[in-house]
Structures are given as C-alpha cells and as structure tokens.
Amino acid sequence: MAVVGERGLARTTLADVADHAGVSIGLVQRYFRSKAQLLRFGVEHMYHRAEQRLREVSDGPVPVASVRDWLDRATETLLPLDDERVRELTVWLEFLPAALADPEMLRMHQETTRTLADALTDALEAAVRAGELPADRDPRAEAVALIACIDGLTLHHLVTAEPFTAEAVRTALTTHLDRLFTAPESPPTP
C-alpha cells in the first residue's frame, strides 16, 4: 500500500514492492501473481481496517451517548485525517478505476459499499426510533447521501487540498450531519 500510494498503480511494479518490503521479488510473486492481485489484497486490507475502526467506535472505551454521537465518530474514521488513512485512501483512489475493468474488484467495492450503506441505514433508523432524527427523513436515502459526502470530501482532501484542509473536511461533515439531524422548519402560517 505504501508503494502504490507513493508511486501510483501504473508506476508500481512487483519489484518495487519487494524492494520496499526488503524481500525478494520471488517471495512477492509467491503471494501475488499480478499487480491486480496485489491491489485487491491492499484494498481488502483497507476495507478491513475501516470496518475495525467503525467497530472500535461502538466497542471503544468511551461510551457513545447517542446515534448522532456514533455517526459523528464513525464517519470521521472514514476520512483521510491521519497518515494511515491518507495512505489507504490514496490506494482506494487507484483502486476505483481498476474496479471498472476488473469484475472481482468491482464486486468487492459494491459489496463493501452496500455493507456501509446498510450500517448507516440501521443507525439512522435507530435515530428515527429514538427521536433523534426527524421522522420525515428517509434513512436509506440519507445513508447514501452521507457516503457520497464522505467520498467527495475524501477525494478533495487528497487531491485538491486547499480549501479542503483536514479542519474544513471535519467542519463540512459536521455541517452535513447538523442539517440531517435538524427538524425541518414549519412553513409560516398565512
């Protein structure tokens, strides 16, 4: 992941990976016959780490006070706000175009995105039941919109940088969640 993140998929060779790992190319080829296999492995690892981070929010030492609190913490773990997540999500950006040409990579991406959408939908449904989220919200549609927001913030933070600084990205995510959790204003009475 470090090599692909630094050099990009097109410029990365299995020899580069072997050199970075301090092992022979034969050892790398024993596990990965192609760059596609290497990329799949790296992205599977990234998806696994993201899932672990989400689980840690739920099971962590600091209790979650509300669904909104969980969403604040959970969605922030999906953004590239530390070195590890920057590296992982840079590889993810390399993975997306490859997924369009590789059915297995496409399946992985679709399955993982569906799982995330399901988890966010479940959380938003719980927020509606708890009275935290206005009842007029469609949890599935809001989960999909939230994923699109996170993905857009990730893309711009990694590629555009200014004005998408870490602080700006956090603020944008909080603003999105604030709007989601705010009850609609009643129209003025005539």
Image: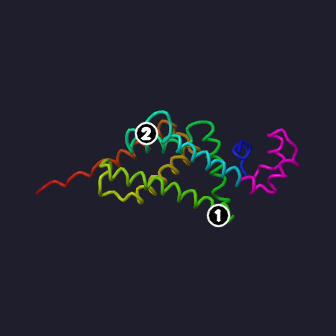
Q: Amino acid at mark 2?
A: Thr
Q: Going from the N terminus, do you reach mark 2 or mark 1 first?
A: 1
In the figure, residue 5 lies in which quadrant?
top right
In the figure, residue 110 lies in which quadrant?
bottom right
Please give the name of the residue rendered at 56% of the width and 48% of the height, measured from the top-left corner: 155
Is residue 131 positioned above or below 108 on the image? above
Q: Which residue is mark 1?
A: 100
Within 10 Å of disc 1 (Cα), the crowding (few <14, some 14-19, many 20+) is: few
Residue 4 locus on image (x, y percent) = 72, 47
Instruction: Tell me the element at label 1.
Output: helix
* Magenta segment main secondary structure: helix
Task: State the mark number for residue 76.
Answer: none
Residue 187 locus on image (x, y percent) = 19, 55
Task: Name the side, left or right, on which 93 lies relative to 27.
Answer: left
Q: Is residue 73 magenta?
A: no
Please give the name of the residue rendered at 36% of the width and 59% of the height, measured from the top-left corner: 138
Residue 106 locus on image (x, y percent) = 63, 62
Residue 24 locus on image (x, y percent) = 88, 44
Q: Which residue is mark 2?
A: 171
Which region shows up in magenta? 10-39
